[in-house]
Amino acid sequence: MTEFDPETFEAEKYVHYFEELEAAYSNAYQQLHGRYDSTVLRAIDRKVLSESEPFYVGDGEFRVELPDDVRARVGSVADHDQFDVVLEELTDRIGTELQRTFGFESRE
């Protein structure tokens, strides 16, 4: 694991922390796999999270900024009753995975 540096994360996260980011996103996805409709989970992963941006907000916490047109990106999947729940839980879990990956205690 690469030692975490907030300034490096902000400036060049995809250069210095690509593997950690990829693992955090993948782990979050796997935690929800089998719990929710796979069509919803896959659409969010491929069409929304692929264009999302993780940020370090300080004090060991991360957030995931989503693209503006989330519902348009997934089309009719946005009408599924699990869509909002899956989207929120997946982004929360990515933040938690990033905390764990970089050695911050989770606040869950």
Image (spheres, helix red, strand yellow):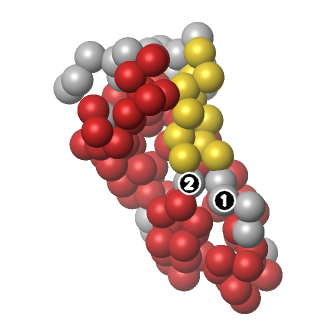
Q: Residue reaching furthest left?
A: 1
Q: Inspect this view and state whether residue 53 appears.
A: yes
Q: Which image quarter: residue 58?
A: top right
Q: Residues within 10 Å of mark 1 (few under 14, many from 20)?
A: some
Q: Residue tagged by mark 2?
A: 52
Q: Amino acid at mark 2?
A: Ser
Circle 2 SS class: loop
Quadrant of the snapshot with the N terminus:
top left
Viewer-nearest residue: 58 or 89: 58
Q: Residue reaching furthest front?
A: 11
Q: Residue at x 38, y 22 (%)?
A: 8
Q: Amino acid at mark 1?
A: Pro
What's the CA distance linking mark 1 and mark 2?
Answer: 6 Å
Q: Residue reaching furthest top?
A: 59
Q: Residue tagged by mark 1?
A: 67
In the displayed structure, 10 sits above or below 92; it is above
**Disc 1 + disc 2, Cβ < 8 Å:** yes
Q: Residue at x 71, y 68 (%)?
A: 70
Q: Residue at x 54, y 81 (%)?
A: 39
> From the viewer's perspective, is 37 left or right of 101?
right
Q: In x, y percent, where is residue 79? A: 79, 81
Q: In x, y percent, where is residue 78? A: 74, 78
Question: Which of the two discs, 1 and 2, labels the residue nearer the N terminus?
Answer: 2
Q: In x, y percent, where is residue 11? A: 44, 29
